[in-house]
Amino acid sequence: MSNTRQRNHRKPQKKINHLMRGKLVGLFAVVLLALVCLLGRITYINATSGQKYKKQVLTQAQQKYESNVLPAKRGDIYDRNGNILATSQKVYNVILDCKTVNSDEDYVEPTVRALVDVLGLDEKDIRSKLSAEDTKNSQYQIIKKQISMDEKKAFEDYQTPGEDSELSDAQKAERSNVKGVWFEEDYLRTYPFNDLACDTVGFTLARDTADVGLESYYNSTLMGADGRQYGYINDNADVEQTIIDPKDGQSIVTTLDVGVQQIVEKYVNGFKEAMGAKNIGVIVENPSTGEIIAMDGGDRYDLNNPRDLSTVYTEDEIKAMNDVETVEALNGMWSNFCVTDAYEPGSVVKPIVMASALEKGAIQETDTFVCDGSQTFGDTMIKCAVYPSAHGTETLGEVIANSCNDAMMQIGAKMGATQFIKAQSLFNFGTRTGIDLPNEGAGIIHTKDSMGETELACSAFGQGFTCTMIQEINAMSSVINGGYYYQPHLVTKVLDSNGGTVKTISPILLKQTISSRISSDIRSYMALSVQQGTSRHSKVQGYSSGGKTGTAEKYPRGNGKYLVSFIGFAPVDDPAVVIYVVVDEPNVEDQANSTYPQYIAQGILSELLPYLNVVPDESEDGTVPETELWEGFKGHLKSTSISDSELDSDGNLVDADGNLIDWDGNRIDENGYLLDANGDHILDEEGNYKMSTNLVSASGSTDADSSGDAVSNPDAPAPLEDDEAETTEDNDEETDGITNEEAGLE
């Protein structure tokens, strides 16, 4: 009964009648017809305009993929203690795709506003690029170069604000319409120590172009090779890309010591402030290896802004320069006097001449010479410094100590022109040393044909021929180190981009010039010059030292212009360092006084020797008396960061726990990358190690007296001109040293 009742209560099912079926069939037919029409239209477009649209896609892809340069990072330059002298930081060029911006009028104003407000670009310039006929359809316009990573991130954050942003929906919508701006990677060369060792380090004119200093000489090593990113549309209309990774440049480790360089420049700057001079050059060298520890070659300029002439010229002088004069001024400022300029050296060559005469047997250690105040050659009288007085009978040590021109002329005559010229060549006078710096000068020496008895006499005390500072100090290093002539050099290692050693550059011994016995004799003669002779103003308390002064009258004679110099070393028995100071035309009425370069050398050595941990060999009870420096330095010496700080045994700045730190007190690793308190590396936004930006390692009155060197008289011959002798080719590129022929080897 119940089952029957349930069946009776079911709802009846609706059935599709003929009218509804007709409507469904009609709808399906319409949809099918639309699909057929669409397919036909697509087929038509593909047949007639397929290539056009394919090219448009390719064009858009090419903006990003076709030929993007992936820049290589230029290698770093380090000092001997790992301090970074030059490095490259990643920066970005701002690229504007005008075609994309102009493709929709809603893009223009938001994009312009973003570039102006965030990156500080000129609105007028941007609108000009967007509207000008030659740029409005361009997809690659560099509108700003070398912005920082922080600036790039600020723009990206502006363009795509986070979810927690308090901006209104309208503001977010506006920023979403910032289009056609992208960033191209690049690198910016930076120099953490600004003008320190500027003449030696040099700078880059572009990322891969350099004409000055180590940057130029080792350019091919440092520059690396750019990579590239290619893109194209394949047969399936997909964008495919090929990436050739950049090869970063190799780094170089130099022989320079930041601490020594700072000490050198401290006293040079102090002398410039107190007295001044046309130019001052200083070289500090390890005589046992040929390594250049410090080099200061002239004008100061900021390596981060090398075209700024304001450190050398006044604002009015700069404004008055035309283009040619500006270029000449820049080249002069960038020139390294220590390497490029040749001059008459004066009496600093006397120990070298004497050593050569002893080695050749022209004189003996026991010989004495009588100075009567002058020597006469035909109608020419060449005087000693004490003329009309005389030195009388002198030993070889006294000849050096007194800087006696008369005796040196006699020694030159005993050698004869042929032997004298051979000796000069043996010590590389007249030939480039092969130092790894560009634009090295060669100087000019006499030939057999040009050297008469007067020329020989003057050459014996350092006039009538020319040399460079690097020639003189390297020759002297050979004289005092036992007779070994090393090629001077500034680089000891080449590192790959990961810091691994690619190449070790060992000292290059080119020849032996004199015997160790004669070398010992010369050191004792030069020590006598410091003890009681013309070099006594260079004395540093507690240390034995040797030295020789130089006073050269510049040509034309009789104009009152002099180049004065001093070359010295310490300690006497085992020289750890040799220093050469040249003061060209000191800013005083009486320029012919060799005490001026001695003041500079004494000041430098007073800090340099303790800094290098040279043991004071003249200390009697373990104490070293303070060296009284030139009174002209008072009030003009600015403390150097490194010499007044806590340094470890390697000359690196450390905190109380012995951790390496930079000058801001931040912990760093041995390569200069920042560390946190736990010693872990600090990372930037891209996950790369962050580099420290402040790295480190380790006319006034005078009391000058009248003691000094003899100078030539107005009848002394002029130095040879450059066109009177042949020179070797420029050493403007990397070498492993000069050839045997250039070195005078058999």
Image (tube, rainbow, N blue to C red):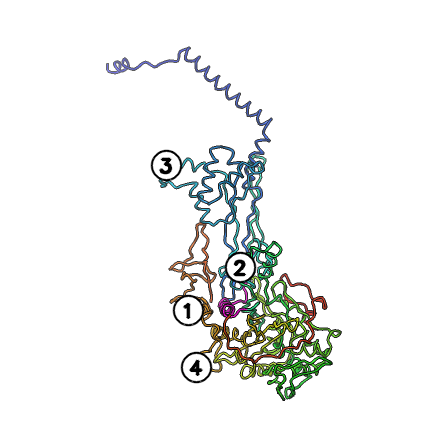
On residue 646, the disc is: 1
Q: Is residue 47 left or right of residue 380?
A: left
Q: Which residue is mark 4?
A: 622
Disc 4 and disc 3 in contact, CB within 8 angstroms: no
Residue 548 versus residue 379: which sits nearer the camera? 379
Q: Is residue 293 left or right of residue 355?
A: left
Looking at the image, is mark 4 or mark 3 earlier in the sequence? 3
Question: What amino acid is labelled 1 in the image?
Answer: Glu
Q: Position of residue 685 (x, y in %)?
A: 43, 50
Disc 3 and disc 2 in contact, CB within 8 angstroms: no
Question: What amino acid is labelled 2 in the image?
Answer: Thr
The answer to whether residue 287 is seen in the rendering is no
Helix, strand or loop for disc 4: loop
**Residue positioned 42% across, 68% down in the render:** 645
Q: Which residues are magenta?
A: 249-276
Q: Mark 2, mark 1: which one is toward the viewer?
A: 2
Indicate yes or no whether the magenta region holds residue 256: yes
Q: How far is disc 3 from disc 2 in space, using C-alphas?
A: 54 Å
Residue 397 sits above or below residue 108 on the image: below
The residue carrying pointer 4 sits among few (fewer than 14), some (14 to 19) or many (20 or more) residues within 10 Å by Cα, namely: few
Residue 685 sits above or below residue 565 on the image: above
Looking at the image, is mark 2 or mark 4 earlier in the sequence? 2
Question: What amino acid is labelled 3 in the image?
Answer: Ser
The residue carrying pointer 1 sits among few (fewer than 14), some (14 to 19) or many (20 or more) residues within 10 Å by Cα, namely: some
Q: How far is disc 4 from disc 1 in space, using C-alphas?
A: 22 Å
